[in-house]
Amino acid sequence: MEQIIALLTLILLEVVLGLDNVIFISIVAARLPEHQQKRARRLGLILAMFLRLALLGIISLILKLEGELFSIFGVGISGKDLILILGGLFLIYKASTEIYHKMEGESGDTSKDIKATTFRSVIIQILILDLVFSVDSIITAVGMVDELWIMYAAVIVTVSIMLFASEPIAKFINKHPAFKMLALSFLILIGVSLIGEGLDFHIPKGYIYFSMAFALLVDIIQMKASKVKAPPVELHEHYLPGEDKAVKDAI
């Protein structure tokens, strides 16, 4: 049962956090002639999936390095522990900077640097962007589950969802940005868990799942119970206003 909960939770997180990646694929593909755009989007998503699966496989091999490298305050640090600690610090850093950007940053800070004109350059740009956006999702997967097959399944299901349901998901997240901020807060929680695990302080995964489920339930209840339908806060995105509309053609 815990494995099913872990899989569903991971898929939900990957979908919410991976939406920017789908939008960027659409933005990059929009630089091509119209008859090539859909092919570039689909190929970009499929190649991105294989890239994530490969990275997961590499990290899973690194996490088998159990030999002690050095010690800190009497706590032995192995190759696996070092990856977990660095991964946890990265998640906390990424989530904190992303929250700051969403609230106070500059819109279009990433999309303005996208330069791609040929089909090959578009695919290369998509893979580079996906590599950048994949690191946090891969570390999140490592922090949430222990079984490699769950990580692989979550990546495949997430990409499938993005192929066929990216537009309604984008509309929902834009209408309810609180879910985006909640997902980023979960990254901080997972980051702390990874650091603790790297220092031999193991936090049971059930505690993390319960905290995330409870917070999500509270958010849903607030959304349903709210009498005043005020317009949502407009978050700052890494793409310019209007560019995200390209996501409607991603299927």
Image (tube, helix red, strand yellow):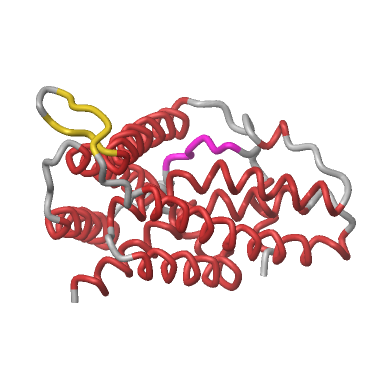
Residue in the image at 67% along x and 45% along y? 242
Q: Where is residue 17 in the image (x, y as percent from the top left)?
A: 45, 51
> In percent of the image, x 82 and y 42: which residue is there?
116
Q: Which residue lies furthest to the front in this view?
A: 67
Does the segment drawn in magenta span residue 160? no
Residue at (43, 55) in percent of width and height: 16
Comparing 2 with 9, the one in front is 2
Most common secondary structure along the magenta stretch: loop
Nearer to me, 217 or 48: 48
Q: In this view, does 37 lie to the left or right of 46?
A: right
Position of the N terminus, as image quadrant, is bottom left
* Corner quadrant of residue 217: bottom left
Q: Position of residue 201 (x, y in %)?
A: 11, 41
- Determine whether, in the image, residue 158 is placed left or right of residue 7: right
Q: In this view, does 139 lie above or below 57?
A: above
> In the rendered structure, which segment of residues is drawn in magenta?
233-238
Residue 144: x %, y % from top left: 28, 55
Picture quarter with the C terminus: bottom right
Q: Residue at x 12, y 48 (%)?
A: 203
Q: Residue most toward the top?
A: 73
Using residue 249 as the reference point, say whether residue 233 is left or right of it: left
The number of discs equals: 0
Residue 78 relative to residue 58: left or right? left
Give the image location of residue 71, x and y in percent: 18, 27
